[in-house]
Amino acid sequence: MRIKILFVCLGNICRSPLAEAIFKKKVAGKGLQEKILIDSAGTSDFHIGEQPDHRSKKNAIENNLEMDHLARQILKEDLDEFDYVLAMDRKNYENILSLSSAKAHQEKVLLMRGFTFDAFDTGSTDLDVPDPYYGGEEGFQNVYRILNDSCDDLLNFLIKRHPDIL
Ligand code: 4NP
């Protein structure tokens, strides 16, 4: 069995390609790259076909990540194809849900930070991965830190839920 994971943000040039790169590295680190397929997409059509934002690329290089994704827009068919669709924030979560009213589709859509309680540890109940697009480079480092933690939690969740992949 192959588990298929789709990370989704708005533009598919900042957060979700970084999540894809981080998660691919963690999955490969456990030797699970044949068991878990990983992709990313955006809810908007703003940047279709584009490489990740230069600040995301810089962040990826600094954190030793390989990033070779080109932006694409999520399609309704992705809700058939993928097993887990991880939304970076609530706005994108709602927009993904609006693609289909089928229960089987809706159940696949989860919040990226929904697996971690670190947001609560820091006294915040905000489960969004903040949109770094209009900020500076420090925003991308903050996004990296959040994604790095939540990717660990996601991988632990998947291994617990699908112990047969080990
Ligand atoms: P992302 O960031 O959703 O993390 O890829 C953004 C990229 C582009 C825009 C907004 C957010 N934009 O408005 O073009």
Image (tube, rainbow, N blue to C red):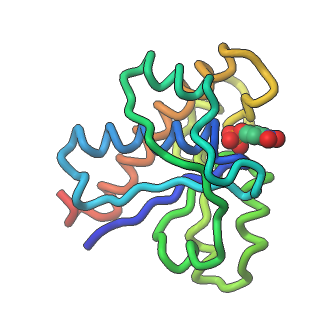
Q: Position of residue 144 (x, y in %)?
A: 54, 26
Left or right: 16 as drawn, with respect to 24:
right
Residue at (72%, 28%) from the top-left corner? 132
In the displayed structure, would residue 20 be above or below residue 130? below
In the picture, the quarter occupied by the N terminus is: bottom left
Residue 55 visible to an observer of this rendering = yes
In the displayed structure, would residue 24 be above or below residue 149? below
Residue at (76%, 51%) from the top-left corner? 90
In the displayed structure, would residue 84 be above or below residue 32? below
Residue 127 visible to an observer of this rendering = no
Residue at (61%, 26%) from the top-left corner? 54
Left or right: 7 as drawn, with respect to 122:
left
In the picture, the quarter occupied by the C terminus is: bottom left
Quadrant in the picture for residue 5: bottom left
Ligand 1: which quarter?
Answer: top right
Quadrant in the picture for residue 35: bottom left
Left or right: 35 as drawn, with respect to 152:
left
143 or 104, nearer to the observer: 143
Left or right: 134 as drawn, with respect to 93:
right
Residue at (40%, 52%) from the top-left corner? 157
